[in-house]
Amino acid sequence: MAKVKEILIAPKANASIMSLSQAQLDAGKGIVGDRYYSAQGTFSEHLKDLPDVELTLIEQEQIQRFNDITSLDYSGQDFRRNIVTEGIKLNELVDKTFSIGDVSCRGIRLCEPCGHLAKQLGSEILDHMIHRGGLRAQILSDGQIQLGDALTLTF
């Protein structure tokens, strides 16, 4: 079963990532308390008015693959995505509607690693995480999510 393994937010750009057991997702806005919800993220101005700023996801399996290849030990927090998933191929959700618990979302585009993240984690990110860095998604309905919630494709 595909599920939420971690929920992560940061109040401002470059602030420490905080782990949550549950979170409020607001359609058209993002995760309450996160830097992009309040337009305080590194790319807030660049992504302004785009729906893919609302939510980012990454697969635990891809984080583990990266660690295995590089002999590093990065966590979901290091990759600075909002939700770490387990048991789902996020690339397949581009242009698809899916749910996280009872919250409806739509996959917009891949969340490729960027120069900003490479400065924080090293250039290996760019070499090994292209097309594996996660998914940018739009939140379509308001609601609470929590750790362990199922991710399901709703077409």
Image (spheres, rainbow, N blue to C red):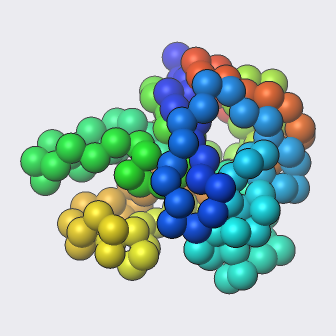
Q: How many marks?
A: 0
Residue 73: in sight, yes or no? Answer: yes
Residue 91: in sight, yes or no? Answer: no
Q: Position of residue 35 (x, y in %)?
A: 68, 60
Residue 99's place in the image compared with 150, above or below, is: below
Q: Position of residue 66 (x, y in %)?
A: 24, 49
Residue 140's place in the image compared with 86, above or below, is: below
Pick whichever, 113 or 6, lies toward us. 6
Residue in view at x 76 percent, y 69 percent: 39
Q: Position of residue 155 (x, y in %)?
A: 76, 37
Pick whichever, 128 or 118, lies toward us. 118
Residue 12's place in the image compared with 106, above or below, is: below
**28 sits left or right of 91 in the view:** right
Pick whichever, 93 or 47, lies toward us. 47
**132 sits left or right of 136 in the view:** left
Q: Position of residue 51 (x, y in %)?
A: 78, 63
Residue in view at x 72 percent, y 81 percent: 45
Residue 92's place in the image compared with 52, above or below, is: above
Instruction: In the displayed orientation, state which residue is furthest to the bottom.
Output: 46
Residue in view at x 59 percent, y 53 percent: 10
**130 sits left or right of 134 in the view:** left
Residue in view at x 33 percent, y 60 percent: 129
* Figure quadrant of residue 12: bottom right
